[in-house]
Image (cartoon, rainbow, N blue to C red):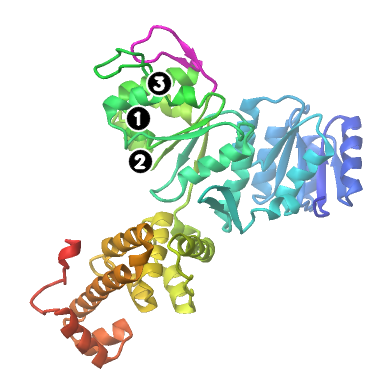
Amino acid sequence: MSEAANILLVDDEPGMLRYIRTLLEVDDHKVETASTGEEALERVQKGLQPDLVLLDLLMPGIDGLQTLEQLRQMKPGMKVIMLSCVNDTRKVVQAMRLGAHDYLTKPFQKAELDAVIGQCIGGAANHAYAGEVEELCDDVFFVAASPAMKKIRAQSALVANVDIPVLLLGESGTGKEVLARLIHKLSPRAHRTFLKVNCAAVPADLLESELFGYEAGAFTGATHAKPGKFELCNKGTILLDEIGEMPPLLQAKLLHVLQDQQFSRLGSRSVVKVDVRILAATNINIPEALATKRLREDLYYRLNAFMLSLPPLRERKEEIPILLKHFMSRMSELYARPPLPLSPPLMEACLNHPWPGNLRELSNFVKRYLVLGDETLAVAELQPKPDGGGGLHHDAAERAAVAGAKSPGGLKSLARSAKDEAEAEAIARALEETNWNRKQAAALLKISYKALLYKIRQYGIAQSRSTHRLSAGA
């Protein structure tokens, strides 16, 4: 049962109004009703402030979509669930774009109504993920703690139930694949296959056979027939990552698949029919890609039935503490090391860092911190640097982490080696930034002057070198 709320119910059928009102009042919701869009708008304009609006799509006069648009203009934060006896995909997509939080097809059961109300007003259905880590599959999780990500989570739940292509945009490392897996998990195809194809990682001449398969003899080395990803993913969901890197000729074939849900294997004249939900992701500049013909315009509009744009991590800092703790827990288990504390100074440094590499950079940072075990160096890495560099030697730390994971017995010595390399790098950078003023460098590194002098001798850092470079990381 969802939390009791003030609900405005808008429907032009008196029988449906009575039925839904009864369902709502059983759970102690306070219900106001309106039989037209005009009446609903007038009630809100005169001061009615419902927690939620249940709005019929098909009504005489001002229909549900027009009412939704005007309600959102009057009260941008108002939560609206659309109701309709017709499951019209175009109407659903339009409602989502206008800001609807969810969509119910009549007739519906009380459990369905309770679930969507719970997601909108913070009932039991919402507690499973609001501000918490939502596990999707092995080592894949989704976090929605910021307003922007909560909105994306709600939109994903809505679009998951509508079998249309979705275009996922965002900087590299923002979690586009995770979002695709969330949509798949929330969709009716959740029990079917989910496959990802990175269009940038597969050579252009092999990508077609990877996607659509081939027959024996289709090319040199094709000794037997092989199904492509689309066949393997029949009835499921496929993510085409880095879609902007797909060759134009192959984009034309993909467009045909989107339109007709059929294609031919390489070397075959027969047609293969499939039922695959296509999600596409990219971090390219869309207008520029369209202008330069890098991305076909007709393919773009076909893929963009609905668009979700992931904000960079610097715009959702509420999630950084959650992500840090979760990554630390995962990494400590992976590398068989006790989790390290996330002190207030370290947390503050993380919150102030811009994270240009987004979640991927944050994950690697936690990995380095865990392996090196030095909070001072971790904080120093996150400090602004004139050359944009960091205080830790990333490659060395990551090599130690990977090698240590493969050989647990040697982790201590590998970590020590990586720590020495990273420490020398941080000291050299601090000295360079302070023009070799050792006292200022010691203060910057938060170590004593004597300790700095000792470490300069220990690592053989010479002033003649502009930046200390270690042969292992060159």
3D distance between C-alphas at marks 3 and 2: 25 Å
On the rendered structure, is 54 left or right of 169?
right
Name the residue type under label 1.
Leu
- Residue at label 3? 212
Could you classify mark 2 by the number of other residues whose Cα lies within 10 Å: few (under 14), some (14-19), or many (20 or more)?
some
- Would you identify the image quadrant in which residue 106 lies? top right
Outermost residue, top direction? 269
Q: Residue at x 79, y 44 (%)?
A: 114
Residue depth check, mark 3 versus mark 1: number of the one nearer the observer: 3
In the image, residue 214 sits, relative to residue 102, either above or below, namely above
Magenta extent: 260-275
Q: Nearer the viewer, residue 175 or 317?
A: 175
3D distance between C-alphas at marks 1 and 2: 10 Å
- Residue at label 2? 284
Q: Nearer the viewer, residue 470 or 99?
A: 470
What count of labels does the image hold? 3
Residue 272 falls within the magenta-colored stretch: yes
Name the residue type under label 3.
Phe
Which element type, helix, strand or loop, lies under badge 2?
loop
